[in-house]
Image (cartoon, rainbow, N blue to C red):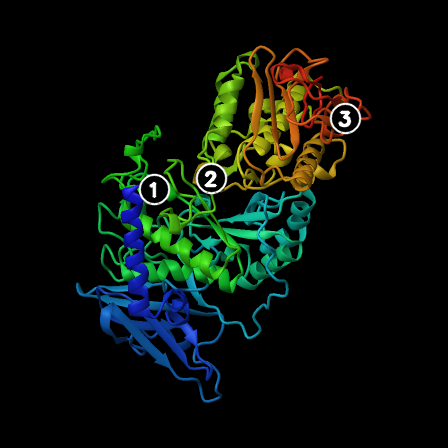
Amino acid sequence: NIASYLLYGLFEKRLFLLEEAEGGFDQFTRSYRTFGVNRMADNRLVLREWAPAAEALFLTGDFNGWDNFSHPYEKKEFGKWELCLPPKHDKSPAIEHNTKLKVVVHTKKGERLYRISPWAKYAIQTEKQVIYDWVHWDPPQPYLHIHPRPKKPQSLRIYESHVGIASPDPKVASYTNFTTNVLPRIKDLGYNCIQLMAVMEHAYYASFGYQVTSFFAASSRYGTPEELKQLIDTAHSLDIVVLLDVVHSHASQNTEDGLNSFDGSDSCFFHSPPRGEHALWGSRLFNYSSWEVLRFLLSNLRWWMEEYRFDGFRFDGVTSMMYHHHGIGSMFSGDYSEYFGLQVDEDSLVYLMTANHVLHTLYPDCITIAEDVSGMPAVCRSVAEGGLGFDYRLAMAIPDKWIQILKELADEAWDMGNIVYTLTNRRYGENCIAYAESHDQFVVGDKSLAFWLMDKEMYTNMSSLIPMTPVIDRGIQLHKMIRLLTHALGGEGYLNFMGNEFGHPEWLDFPRKGNNESYHYARRQYNLLDTDHLRYRQLYDFDRDMNRTEDKYGWLAAPPAFVSAKHEGDKVIVFERGNVLFLLNFHPTRSQTNYRVAVASPGKYTIKLDSDEVQYGGHGRLDHNTEFFTEPQPFNERDNSMLVPLVGVSQL
């Protein structure tokens, strides 16, 4: 349409300017080599900052005894400042690895401000200290990646992860713990992609990583940058790709250890208020029309791809970026007037198009995912077609639907047609990531699906050494079926938040004043899987075999499913996808025997995955030695053409 045509014109103009002014986007997006602190081949240090509103800049730190005036920056054009430090007499750099630094900003108002460089590669928080310190990271023996990046998976199965909570211990877990103890589980479960949250440095742990203070720094609370590199390299050795949950939609309002008011002004990297403030998040909003902001953000993406060898990004808060109203108070009915008009932020859209163009041009196997609840058309179409260029968007209506059903409806009131509609309601040709629940669904104040299903009985009745109670029985069976249906019908990729695959028994709440800084709910109890008689293991095994079955048959990479039945009375859903037939019985009280369903192809059918198997916490009521045959039928008789060839089943 004309809106996409005009938008593409703005994008082309941006690319042309990059070629003219910067010599192309390849050099422009490597600006982390010229901004911040960079060591040259002769050990000379060159420091560069962009602080257009500053009156003067100085560098202070351990290296000069915290002298505020001994090392001034020289003012350059376009608001840039530069400082060159020759090597010491022994030819070593003037600033050693692990040295604390500060930029001293003098404002036109006569203020003296102490700041962390926006390009800082490492920041730490010492014990009982509120403000983060900038630490110069330049190890003499940096980690060298050994393993090549895996190829982009055809079927994307994502394990959404937070390093800090990836341990049963009540503390902040480490990159090394994740590498040693969690990566093998992810591989065993059949996930081929990890989405790492809360890696970009954030001063407030309870923000879940979404209030970023240092965009180029890997969070020090989990360990060193080298340990994160080892984590990613080890994942690559297991043929697992790693995505970064990147936050370019907003930034923390912190000043001393964030981007906010870096040069003493109320803008710099952001729009001036009120446009530059998010009313609900209490954070600052980037000025995507600014040349130097474009340099900063695009170079940030390139940094994580080059330095740490991430394989792509899940872009947080894309809905907030795309609209001036940031999605606040908007229901998004699907009317096209909601997506094309003055409420759309063209600067943001051009930035997203440019980011995807750069990433997919330089890294053909790069994966980008948009967190967009609005459903804007063409978010997942190529930039050349006038789209934003993302590979996938999150199907955010699906988890909301499951939570709504479990909160509001009795089992007999489940609407098969409405469930199928929600799972299949996506634009053809725009790939979606389906998920029954992510981290969003069970932060403090809400529950995981397992908790909605089984609640307090998860603490007392999950042992297979005692008879299964009706609550646990229902919860375990529906937990499996909800996941299988979402996995197979809901999208072209699948996502699970760590621990949810085995029905993690508690919600998520980070240490904060309101809970006396407790880590009790900021951990994942993988130790529950090591006790064989607990039924958490049965849910884990089903999730593993569901992924392995998909890996064999590839339904996520197949065209959308054909749904042949959504029977309200029987509570049965039947569909075919990727040459696999799925049949699910959601009836709360009635098993379906001698049930006949339609199939597209006659022949022999065998059961490949049965959620009612005893090893998955089921009742084992199906004879897996049975083979089902079908014969060609006239079209008008196809509704009764075969007898129960099941891949996913709850009850028979």
Query: Which labelled disc corresponds to residue 352?
Result: none
Residue 434: give x, y in percent of width and height: 52, 35
Foreground pick, 96 / 620? 620
Query: Which labelled disc corresponds to residue 429?
Result: 2
Q: Residue at left 31%, top 35%?
A: 328
Disc 1, disc 2: CB below 8 Å? no
Label 3 secondary element: helix
Q: Which residue is mark 3?
A: 614
Estimate the spatial distance between the alpha carbons at disc 1 and disc 2, rounded to whole Å. Answer: 24 Å
User: Marks 1 and 2: which is nearer the front?
Assistant: 2
Residue 331: give x, y in percent of width and height: 34, 29
> Mark 2 Cα within 10 Å, few/some/many (few <14, many 20+)?
few
Q: Is residue 630 above or below residue 497?
A: above
Query: Which labelled disc corresponds to residue 320?
Result: 1
> Mark 3 Cα within 10 Å, few/some/many (few <14, many 20+)?
few
Q: Is residue 79 left or right of residue 383?
A: left
Disc 1, disc 3: CB below 8 Å? no
Estimate the spatial distance between the alpha carbons at disc 3 and disc 2, rounded to whole Å. Answer: 39 Å
Quarter holding the C terminus is: top right
User: Marks 3 and 2: which is nearer the front?
Assistant: 2
Q: Is residue 112 left or right of residue 560?
A: left
Label 2 secondary element: loop
Residue 102: give x, y in percent of width and height: 36, 67
Label 1 secondary element: helix
Residue 614: give x, y in percent of width and height: 76, 26
Q: Residue at left 70%, top 38%?
A: 529
Q: Earlier in the sequence, mark 3 or mark 2?
A: 2
Kindly indicate the quadrant of the structure image that contains residue 572: top right
